[in-house]
Image: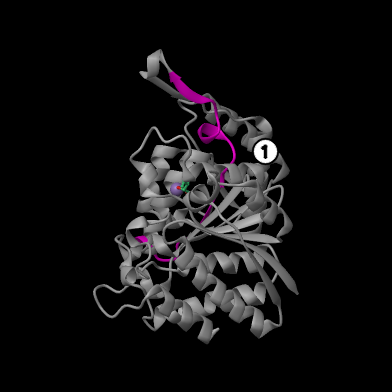
Amino acid sequence: MNLKIALLAGDGIGPEVIDQAVKVSDAVARKYGHQITWMPALTGAAAIDDCGEPYPLSTHEVCLQADAVLFGAIGHPKYDNDPSAKVRPEQGLLKMRKQLGLFANVRPTFTFPSLIDKSPLKRERIEGTDLVFLRELTGGIYFGDKGRTDGGNTAYDHCVYTREEVQRLAKKGFELAMQRSKKLCCVDKANVLETSRLWRETVQAMEKDYPEVTVSYEFVDAVAMRLVQWPNSYDVLITENLFGDILTDEASVISGSMGLMPSASIGLKTSLFEPIHGSYPQAAGKDIANPLATVLSAAMMFEDAFQLKTEAQAIRDVVNKSLAEGIVTEDLSDGGKSYKTSEVGDWLAAHV
Ligand code: IPM
Ligand code: MN
């Protein structure tokens, strides 16, 4: 198969972790007789430096021509402490999500048997955890009207959802639940927010189309608590954009390191695959970041974008092998022997 993949390394540790995912993907392609054409393009602070735009049209065109997008991370500290910056790298990510119509962000949380004791949570709480968040990604407070009034002394961000936006996300949730344990949790704040009441009402109306799926409705604050208390009581969770952003960072703690969890963003056009972690600027250029979340995002890409399940499993297997043999970056080494980002990537590629 010929696979055309847009390669958006982005900022911070993005380029380093992306390099490892490329090595591993190329190794898998060689082994199974595929041809990958990588199509690099700029995003984030790197793109602002180049042309003043965090998601330039030229990059969007590359994404549209590709069969899938592999994405690193976006964000740069020089913008974080400057609230007056007119252009910010993160705007590129939001624009990319919107323009590619990536309305569903699939974020799994699972544990690795060899890392169970790396989690700050007790083994008996987290063993067997295997859940998936479907985070709505192109609506809500991220994209509503925002601004200042009162001479700059009052600020607002509107949270807006349409019934159709809720339906298309919830449909993915029901479908995923049908492929898994037929349990779906709708996370909202319907005791306070009108948008949440629309979510709940819309999902309730869809229940009749999926009679086999058991749906629970839980408030986001309670989920935040139960997620670390009894994570394995959840399976598929659907939620709006901001709640999903917060809960998926929280959930990543269960697996032991934020550097482990992959994600897929799917929607109307080309799908995008990216680690859930950010650009981790403190580690940029040091060759210490954990590349596994990005490598596992490449596995999701083989499976979801190209229907290449064996290839995806080959990547997951070699990742498990590296963890079992202690070929890990310093976030997972407990002060013991650790490997550089690039060494982990080389090892994975050699052992595919
Ligand atoms: C994520 C990130 C982004 C988000 C930021 C970088 C805009 O935190 O992908 O979760 O909030 O969606
Ligand atoms: Mn986030």
* Residue at screen point 51% across, 35% down: 142
The residue at label 1 has a CB less than 8 Å from ligand 1 = no
Residue 237 rendering spot, x and y as whole percentages: 53, 48
Residue 77 rendering spot, x and y as whole percentages: 36, 48
Image quadrant where residue 127 sits:
bottom left
Q: Which region is colored magenta? A: 125-148
Residue 159 rendering spot, x and y as whole percentages: 52, 28
Image quadrant where residue 291 sits:
bottom left
Residue nearest the viewer, comparing 38 with 159: 38
Residue 305 rendering spot, x and y as whole percentages: 68, 62
Quadrant (top left, top right, bottom left, bottom right) of the C terminus:
bottom right
Residue 221 higher or lower than 24, as above or below = above
In the image, taking residue 161 as reference, residue 116 lies left or right, namely left
Asked if one can make out residue 155 in the rendered structure from this viewpoint, the answer is yes
Magenta run includes residue 231: no
Residue nearest the viewer, comparing 178 with 238: 238
The extreme front residue here reads: 50
- Give the residue type that dot 1 points to: Gln
The extreme right residue here reads: 1
Residue 156 higher or lower than 213, as above or below = above
Element type at mark 1: helix
Which residue is label 1 attached to? 167
In the image, taking residue 124 as reference, residue 165 lies left or right, namely right
Residue nearest the viewer, comparing 83 with 235: 83
Quadrant (top left, top right, bottom left, bottom right) of the N terminus:
bottom right
* Residue at screen point 60% across, 30% down: 161
Magenta run includes residue 132: yes
Count how many numbered circles sit on residues in the image.
Answer: 1
* Residue at screen point 66% across, 51% down: 58
